[in-house]
Image (tube, helix red, strand yellow):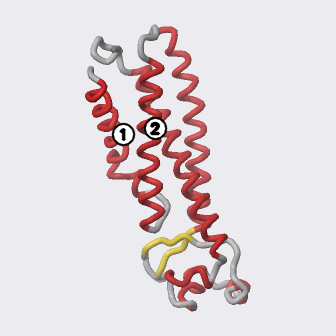
Amino acid sequence: MTQKEYLRKAIEVVTFLFAAFSGYLKGIAPPEERSATFATGLASFLALVIFLLISGVSRGTAPQKQKALWLRLAAALFVVCAVSGLAYKHELDQLTFPYPSDSDGAQYIAGTVPTQMAKPYFDKDYSASQVVAKFGGPENKQLVWTQESINRAGMLLTTLYLVLVVSLAATIFSLTEIVLPKTASNAT
């Protein structure tokens, strides 16, 4: 297989990973267009790199010797995937809000530190959506939370998403090294 064919095949595998399960991985990306596009794009490239690394490491090695290694690696990566998945879901619930609040509207990234103007509303147990509505909607959320805390929340969600997707991809790719038989065409 030529390098060009090998790269094409790797891209097909990663594309399949992101399209599988009705686009689930894209659907759980951090909300807001810019964050989602960045996170899914970077995750795709990282998954491609992981696939190529695992394929490169597994080339030319005796399959029997490597099965135990791939199994241990897959188990460790699966634990990372499970823990990061739960952490991501928890933080996604904590750091996002729907708007408008009375429907299944779009999700937006919230901050963690309210501004002095918004703090009284949170003290009165208003929901994030209600407070954002009082300040004119999501385009004014920097009036509700400090911009730094909004940026930090977005970075945390993006980081957890990347850890989740990359560990999931690496788990799947490691398991394929155990399950799929080596053939003459993919051993070279």
The mark total stands at: 2
- Above or below: residue 84 compared with residue 118: above
| Residue indicated by mark 1 | 14
Q: Which residue is drawn at 29% across and 37% down?
A: 12
- Above or below: residue 12 compared with residue 23: above
Q: For numbered disc 1, what is the local secondary structure? A: helix
Is 39 left, or right, of 10 in this rendering?
right
Earlier in the chain: of badge 1 and badge 2, it is: 1
How far apart are the two marked residues, 1 and 2, measured between alpha carbons?
8 Å
Position of residue 1 measured from the top left corner of the image (x, y, whole percent): 26, 20
Q: What residue type is labelled 2?
A: Ala
Position of residue 158 measured from the top left corner of the image (x, y, whole percent): 54, 56
Q: For numbered disc 2, what is the local secondary structure? A: helix
| Residue indicated by mark 2 | 169
Q: Which amino acid does label 1 sit on?
A: Val
- How many residues crowd around disc 1 within 10 Å: few (fewer than 14), some, or many (20 or more)? many
**Closest to the observer, 157 or 41:** 41
- How many residues crowd around disc 2 within 10 Å: few (fewer than 14), some, or many (20 or more)? many
Position of residue 70 measured from the top left corner of the image (x, y, whole percent): 52, 21
Looking at the rendering, which quadrant does residue 175 occupy?
top left
Position of residue 11 measured from the top left corner of the image (x, y, whole percent): 32, 38
Which numbered marker is on residue 185?
Answer: none
Q: Which residue is drawn at 66% across and 71% down?
A: 148
Q: Which residue is drawn at 60% across and 31% down?
A: 76
Is 157 left, or right, of 176 in this rendering?
right
Q: Do the residues labelled 1 and 2 touch (CB within 8 Å)?
A: yes
